[in-house]
Amino acid sequence: MTRAILIGEHEGQARAWLLAHGIDDLVTPAGAEIALLGTGGAIAAHAASAGEGAVIMLRGVAPEAFDLSSLLRAHDSAEAAVTVALFAREKATLLGWSGAAAEMDRSGRILRWSPKGDFDRDLNWIDAGVFVLAPAVLKRIPSGTPFDLVRQLVPLCLRSQLVVRGYAVGSKVLPSAPTRQPISR
């Protein structure tokens, strides 16, 4: 079974998209819980009761921009610890989208990760706000202490030489936070 953790302002649209893909185990942590535990800590707290299935963390991207089933198949076939949906830097720039930046090889494996959206030209992919987490990686998140998914968990997985995979997605974006809103034209 796959559990989805919804973080952000567009819960209704995300919920409908996940249900359409057959995922009905949905949780939305309270803002106070995220502030206390960080995104990683809140996800780990809610994932503990999900059993052995993968956990999807979703925020900010319009779900219809890509096929969730394909993303989950890519995650499973790579035996990835983490799979991150990514925009090409050019699309992200056109949309006014900012997020963590990554360098990905031809196979989709993330080689480098910059939580602050480093402008190194080799970091040509930008996090689109959708993460799939294997159950084993959730055990690396310390309980009861703030732990950030983007700033701490992904770098920890890379340092530990776990498979962190990127998955290229389309360009339709939902605004979720001031730094992640598309430019109005």
Image (cartoon, rainbow, N blue to C red):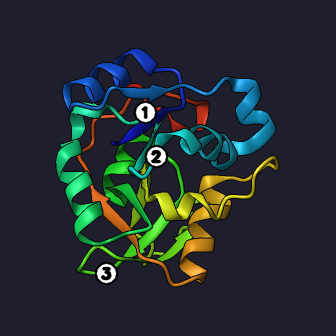
Tell me the tag on residue 105. Answer: 3
Number of labels in the image equals: 3
Amino acid on which disc 3 is placed: Asp
Q: Quadrant of residue 184?
A: top left
Q: Reading the chain from its start, which is encountered first: label 3 or label 2?
A: 2
Q: Residue drawn 27% across and 63% down?
A: 76
Q: Is residue 163 above or below residue 6?
A: below
Q: Position of residue 141 (x, y in %)?
A: 67, 58
Q: Reading the chain from its start, which is encountered first: label 3 or label 1?
A: 3
- Could you tell me how far apart the alpha carbons at marks 3 and 2 are, in whole angstroms? 32 Å
Q: Is residue 102 visible?
A: yes
* Nearer-the-camera pick, 157 or 143: 143
Q: Position of residue 85 (x, y in %)?
A: 35, 53
Q: Which residue is mark 2?
A: 51
* Nearer-the-camera pick, 121 or 40: 40
Q: Position of residue 164 (x, y in %)?
A: 43, 71
Q: Which residue is mark 1?
A: 182
Element under label 3? loop
